[in-house]
Amino acid sequence: MRDLVATFSIVAFDPASEELGVAVQSKFLAVGAVVPWARAGVGVVATQAMANVSYGPRGLELMAQGRTAEETVQELVAADEGREDRQVGVVDARGRAATFTGNECFDWAGGVTGEHYAAQGNILVGVETVQAMARVYEEATGDLAGRLLAALDAGQEAGGDSRGRQSAALLVVREAGGYGGQSDRVVDLRVDDHPDPIQELIRIRDLHTLYFGETEPEAVVAVDGDVREEVVTALHRLGYLDSSGLDDEQLYEALRAFVGTENFEEREQDRGFLDRRVLDFMREKR
């Protein structure tokens, strides 16, 4: 069972945002270092079972050259003498999906495809895991990362990996979608060793959204009146302000220092305004 990555995963494309992503869970240490591969504007790959890790970069290169998801899978497995021990799911940048499960993969093993996604798994309790992932992905709303996590969680609830749980990962890419618009990695999160990896992945994804999510226009509040008093109180409590002789310059310098210390640069607003989620964080922080 050398290099066995028994797991379940879902790969997908969101035509609205042009994001590509993969979510995966396994009874395997640090599954995020092996299974998920994605390139913005090109495609996404999940390679598992007796994992051939080269399927990731090779699959992305084939799609970059113009191969469809199905053509990519066909070329990968045709060139691999160990293909009957492999499992792979692929979606290209037009949302075309393909999945492959070799005949020697350990039961239960298989996959399904739907509009813009492929779900697959091996050493599962049963087919219910991939069916649940497919159903919930199709029914879910919101951004791609949230839909992938909802599908992954449903797969676990339906049985998941028959050996148990250990690690999980989430990778979503979009051109210039990363931190500061300087990378393509919208979300790249891993839980390498945890008794409940999917729930832990959901928790840290919520934190990622808090720190790096975009501020909606309706979530911007003016720092005046009661809000100003709340901000002053919080900054004083947290050690950023000496409340005596307070003026606006001191307040906004302290607020800028708080935003930088807590890594809220992506939610920083123009002088005199504040992201409501940052305000909520200030209220609760001790």
Image (cartoon, rainbow, N blue to C red):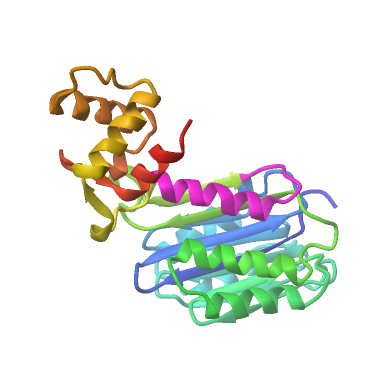
Front-most of residues 278 and 193: 278
Span of residues in magenta? 191-211
Is 139 drawn above or below residue 55 in the view shown? below
Residue 195 location in percent, x, y? 76, 47
Instruction: State the count of labels.
Output: 0
Drawn side of residue 230 relative to residue 189, left or right? left
Q: Residue sitting at 34 percent across and 73 percent down? A: 16
Query: In which quadrant of the rendered view does residue 263 lie?
Result: top left
The image shows residue 220 at horizontal and vertical percentages of 24, 52
Q: Give the residue drawn at x 46%, y 51%.
A: 187
Q: Examine the rendered structure and indicate whether residue 183 appears above or below residue 117.
A: above
- At which x and y percent is residue 217? 23, 58
Q: Is residue 165 left or right of residue 16?
A: right
- Residue 222 seen from this side: yes
Q: Nearer the viewer, residue 109 or 208?
A: 208
Q: Main secondary structure of the magenta part?
A: helix
Magenta-colored stretch includes residue 278: no
173 lies left or right of 139: left
Query: At 60% from the left edge and 69% from the top edge, which residue is drawn?
Result: 151
Inspect the magenta stretch and tell me whether residue 201 lies in it: yes
Residue 88 % position (x, y): 64, 66
Viewer-nearest residue: 262 or 100: 262
Question: Can I make out residue 53 in this image?
Answer: no
Q: Quadrant of residue 253?
A: top left
Q: Quadrant of residue 101?
A: bottom right
As drawn, 167 above or below 50: above
Q: Residue at point 54% right, 80% down?
A: 139
In front of the other: 244 or 68: 244
